[in-house]
Image (spheres, rainbow, N blue to C red):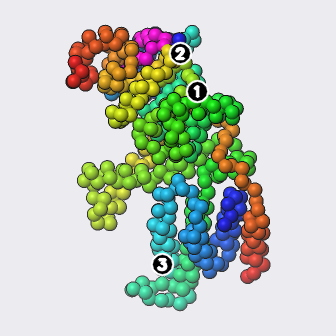
Amino acid sequence: MGPSVVATDLTFRYFAASRPVFSAFRVNIPGGSRCAILGPAGAGKTTLLEILSGAAASHYKTAIADGRVTIGDKTHIPIPHEVLFPRVGLVLQDPSVQISGIRHTVRSEIEFTLENLGMGKDVRAAKVARILERFSLTHLADRHPYRLSGGEMQRVALASIVVAEPDLLLLDEPANALDERSRNELAGILRSISPATTIVFTDYTPEFALETADRFVLLDNSTTRFEGTRDEFLTALSTFSALLPTEGIV
Amino acid sequence: MAHSINDKLSILIFFLSIALAGPAEAALISVIVLLITRALAPPFRPLAQASRRRFLPVFLSLVLLACLMTIVNGLLLQEGEVFTVAGLSLYEGGIRFGVKTGARLLLIATSLLVFFGSVTIPHLASSLQHAGLPTQIVMTVLLTVYFLETIPERITRIFSAQEARGAPVRSRVDRRVRSFLSILAPLILSGIVESIERGTALTLRGYRAGTRLEFEGGGESRLSGVGKLFIVLSFFVFILAWVLP
């Protein structure tokens, strides 16, 4: 079972920002769940993922944080102060940024992650071959990562993180700018990931989340407006129309 | 045609030595040789198709710049005979100096363009790493090359966006120049933002400063007889420049 994620009284403010992104924020994501963090732009979704991955403290050194973040059995006070990869993997919103730009094939692009982890050549080759097959990327293995469609590039970016087998997988608006086919493929991939990995992803519309997630959190103005199961979310969805586009769902 | 990166590097050094120490005539002949090589040589990196297409416009811009330099020097350096061309009084000494400087700059730029256009990024990186450069510097070079390659595409994107907003990007030259300023700001800003994001993304994939990188096909960096010959020729150019008046 993947690790649970608990944020307790979390406060986070970027240096020189007039107000904090989070103030006494709380969230509880059970281990092994596929949790969707929903909310309008500026709700704090990306910042939350950056905090959980360790990127926030590592890259915004002047930010002010308070509270407690617990991932599995490890408690970080106030937040993870270094990037927690490979235990925690974050897939950024723009897959083209996640592609390193220094590798010329999809295969070696994915392998780059394992090189960083110091794995041997044989182990790397076996792991990459497995992930290529699992993510339906085998036929693209020798293509340049930048010569792919948006959906394919998104799969490569995701594969380059999943290949490290993180316990907690974070995805920032993974379905953003994907066509329906690519979105369905991505939803299938996320559903195929075993509960040994907890998945947390963000989105500003509920459609993709309803196809993929079993746990829902709704953020508004940096506070949790809703936290619950899929059924509970569907029941309450009509009351969120001011925050989420619910047309055609409710 | 040399394929080892060290051979190409020795050829580059040879052309740079001509540019720095050789006469203007030799520099101009070298530029022509490079252009012919560029036109005939097939093993230019396939992933730089866009930069290959842009080679000629960039080269023509450099020629224009060299001509401009010659005219400005001809006007300002008042030595020797005076020629009147299209109402402009140009001095012989100034023109000579302008042609010499322009030819040298043209050769430096062209040889660098041809070198970077004919070397794959993994080869370049591998060679730098073999030369003992710290991994952080190799990584910085790689990311810079990547960024430089994306600049034309970025400019096109921002250009289209500005045009869609009614900016006079296809209007008179003076208006185009003014609208170019509106392209520069987003270009610089997007470059800064992306470099920060790219750094974050690399860290998020486990890259740490100092991690030794591996590159495909990075083994062929030996110096062949051709490369050694060009290194000797480079020394020869400097010795000749020192000996001859």
Q: Quadrant of residue A181?
A: top left
The residue under the point 51% across, 40% down is A139
Badge 2 sits on which subunit? A
Cα–Cα span, label 1 and label 3 = 61 Å
Q: Position of residue B199 (x, y in %)?
A: 54, 37
Cα–Cα span, label 3 and label 2 = 72 Å
Q: Is residue A4 above or below residue B10?
A: above
Closer to us: B228 or A193: A193
Q: Position of residue B190 (x, y in %)?
A: 43, 44
Q: Which residue is mark 2?
A: A196
Q: Which residue is mark 1?
A: A164
Q: Are marks 1 and 3 on the same chain?
A: no
The residue under the point 56% across, 51% down is B145
User: Could you tell whether B240 is left or right of A193 in the image?
Assistant: right
Badge 3 sits on which subunit? B
Q: Position of residue A203 (x, y in %)?
A: 36, 25
